[in-house]
Amino acid sequence: MKKFTLALLIIAGCTVSMIILDHEGRSARVKGKTYVLARERFPAYSVITTNDLFSLWQEQQVHGRIVVHLGRFLHFMEVGRSSGGPPQISTIVADHERFTIDRTSYKDFLWVAFQTNIARELYTVFPLADFKKRFDSSSPQKEIIKHEYGSLRIFTTNLPSIAEPVLLNIDASFFASVDAVQLLDDLMKSGLKADIVTICLAEDNPDVTNSDRQKARDFITLLSAHANISNYKPYSPFSKVTK
């Protein structure tokens, strides 16, 4: 009986320790206050380019985070990959050691976020039409799960249900086929928690139209009923190295 009781105490102790370690790990990754988007007025940033977005993440020193990105594009072109060929490992390693803002673009900033440990998981939320176009349009599937060097990468058409606070970015391209009012309603019903929310006008991406950007600005106006929105500008010249 004593052995059984001791075993139960050991199991309980291990369980409590794991819960505490998990909570401490999450707390260490989140720099500022976390907001439940549907319940609290939260801060958000309007950023001009994807470089500005990446600069903001660097300035906030975020690491090991879940990133939820809403947009039509992957932003995942691998540095060092030749046309039609595999990535050159030596090139990737060399670039990983000295990624700077001026060497990051709309083509690859989410890939760089993975390589520099800003992101450990990535949810890319597509408009339904773009999801069908990019993946198998004949399939009823609306979520695809992949892994990038062991890191979870999910493609979906819906805002995910995640208990952990996220980095939330809404790209102007998302509004090519999505209504701003509907997105706001979905966001308020999502249950998402976040400490950094951004709306990127993507002025560095030639595939994003002026109409998309105007719709993003309209969304910012709607969002201002729930958030305190700041126009972000990089703190320093593009010379800071991510380590």
Image (cartoon, rainbow, N blue to C red):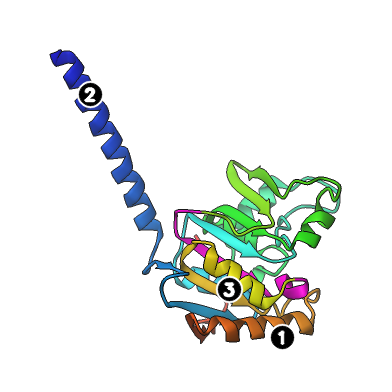
Among numbered discs 2 and 1, the one appearing first in the sequence = 2
Query: In the rendered image, which residue does mark 2 sit on?
Result: 8
Query: What quarter of the picture does the N terminus occupy?
Result: top left
**Residue 158 location in percent, x, y?**
65, 58
Decide: marks 3, 1 in contact (CB < 8 A)? no
Residue 100 visible in the snapshot: no
Calculate the distance from the C-alpha at mark 2 to the C-alpha at mark 1.
60 Å
Q: Residue 85 or 74: which is nearer the viewer?
A: 74
Label 3: how many Cα within 10 Å (few below 14, some 14–19, many 20+): many
Residue 229 visible in the snapshot: yes
Disc 3 residue type (three-letter): Leu
Disc 1 residue type (three-letter): Gln
Judged from the image, the secondary structure of the residue bearing numbered disc 1 is helix
Q: Going 35% across and 57% down the picture, which residue do you hit?
A: 27
Q: Going 70% across and 66% down the picture, which residue do you hit?
A: 71
Please give the label number shown on residue 53: 3
Stretch of the chain drawn in magenta: 162-177
